Image (spheres, rainbow, N blue to C red):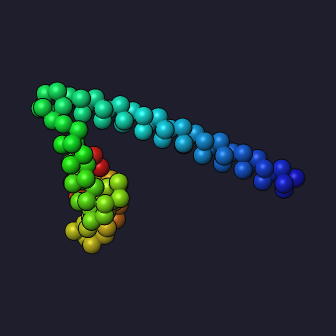
Amino acid sequence: MVANQARLQHDIERREADRQIEELEERVERLALACEAMWDLLRRDQNKTDDDLLHWVRHFDAADGQVDGRIQRQPRKCSCGAMVNYRSHSCVYCGAEVGRVSPFA
C-alpha cells in the first residue's frame, strides 16, 4: 500500500515536471521567434549587421560582471531594508512600490 502511494506520488510529480518542461520549451520558442523578428527589423531598418548584434550581446552579458551567456539580475533594496526580487514591483514585507527596473524583468 505504501509503495503504491509512493509510486502514485512519483507519477504525479513526474507528470507535473513534464508539463512545466513543455511550458518552458514553448516559451523559449516564442521568445526565440520574437527575437529573430526584432533582429530582422533592426537589421533592415537600421542597417545593423550580425557583428553589431554580437557586440551588444557581449556588452549586456558582461554588464553583471560575468561573461557567462546569462543576465544575473540583482535584487533591489526597499526603503524598509528588505530585499526585493527584480521581478517584483512591490515589497512583500511593507507593500511599498519599488518600481520597475526594466521592461524585461
Side of 20 where 3 appears, left or right:
right
Q: Quadrant of residue 53?
A: top left
Question: Relative to residue 2, is residue 52 depicted above or below?
Answer: above
Question: Relative to residue 6, is residue 26 depicted above or below?
Answer: above
In the current view of this chain or complex, which residue is farthest to the right? Answer: 1
Q: Tell me where residue 57 appears, x and y as whole percent.
A: 25, 49
Disc count in the image?
Answer: 0
Q: Quadrant of residue 33?
A: top left
Q: Residue at coordinates 60% horizontally, 46% vertically from top-left?
A: 17
Residue toward you, 91 or 40: 40
Residue toward you, 67 or 63: 67
Q: Tell me where residue 43 appears, x and y as whole percent.
A: 18, 31
Residue toward you, 60 or 13: 60
Q: Residue at coordinates 47% horizontally, 34% vertically from top-left?
A: 26
Q: Tell me where residue 103 appears, x and y as whole percent.
A: 24, 45
Q: Is residue 65 visible?
A: yes
